[in-house]
Image: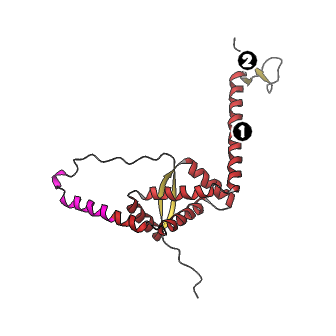
């Protein structure tokens, strides 16, 4: 009897997500007692199941087939002398933080196929999976309380920083200088007039 199970081959896939998405994944992981990677994998699994069980998937696949057939015909009929004369279109830039998710081959294949059906990218599919998952989880009372605590802590730190900054501007600098009649460790305030 073989007790060691083979680990399925995984591949890291990088995706840029909004900073809020990253923060919410971290917060959710902390509340549930897991890690961000587990939350991302759960999001992807749920997303794949919902997409594969969608009643409109067959019609979406048929539309994608027609779109690809037209694209293949365009490639076949293109004059090689004209290749490279058109300027490439720029992809929409997503600002945020970079995260990496390990996907097994089945997940990677399914997400890639859905990206082809939806005429977008693998990264777009991952962002959709994470966003849909977090939208569902945002109603979780534990997450709402944790988000409120985090927001309050950030507001307190911001307020403390403002107070410290204002004090630094308003108060004269203090330096330790040995002077006649003072101990070397005493702080003496110098005022410039």
Camera-side residue: 142 or 188? 142
Q: Quadrant of the N terminus?
A: bottom right
Say which element carries label 1.
helix
Q: Is 70 in the magenta?
A: yes
Q: Secondary structure at mark 2?
A: loop
Q: Main secondary structure of the magenta part?
A: helix
Q: Which mark is residue 156?
A: 1
Point 48% across, 71% down: residue: 9
Query: In terms of image quadrants, where is residue 184?
Result: top right
Q: How is the image coloured?
A: secondary structure
Q: How packed is label 1: few (under 14 Cα within 10 Å), some, or many (20 or more)?
A: few
Report x, y in % for residue 64: 35, 63
- For label 2, the residue is 190
- N-terminal of the pair, mark 1 or mark 2, is 1
Magenta region, residue range: 65-82
Q: Quadrant of the C terminus?
A: top right
Q: Is residue 156 left or right of residue 126?
A: right
């Amino acid at each position: 009897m073989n007790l060691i199970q083979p680990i399925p081959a995984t591949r890291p896939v990088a995706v840029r997500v909004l900073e809020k998405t990253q923060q919410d994944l971290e917060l959710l992981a902390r509340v549930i007692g897991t890690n961000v990677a587990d939350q991302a994998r759960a999001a992807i699994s749920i997303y794949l199941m919902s997409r594969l069980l969608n009643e409109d998937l067959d019609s979406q696949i048929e539309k994608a087939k027609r779109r690809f057939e037209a694209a293949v015909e365009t490639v076949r009929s293109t004059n090689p002398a004209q290749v490279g004369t058109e300027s490439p279109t720029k992809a929409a830039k997503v600002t945020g933080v970079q995260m990496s998710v390990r996907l097994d081959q089945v997940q990677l294949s399914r997400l890639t196929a859905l990206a082809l059906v939806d005429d977008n990218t693998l990264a777009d599919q991952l962002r959709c999976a994470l966003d849909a998952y977090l939208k569902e989880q945002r109603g979780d009372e534990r997450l709402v309380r944790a988000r409120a605590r985090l927001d309050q802590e950030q507001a307190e730190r911001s307020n403390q920083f403002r107070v410290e900054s204002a004090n630094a501007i308003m108060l004269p600098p203090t330096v330790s200088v040995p002077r006649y009649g003072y101990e070397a460790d005493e702080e003496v305030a110098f005022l410039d007039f």
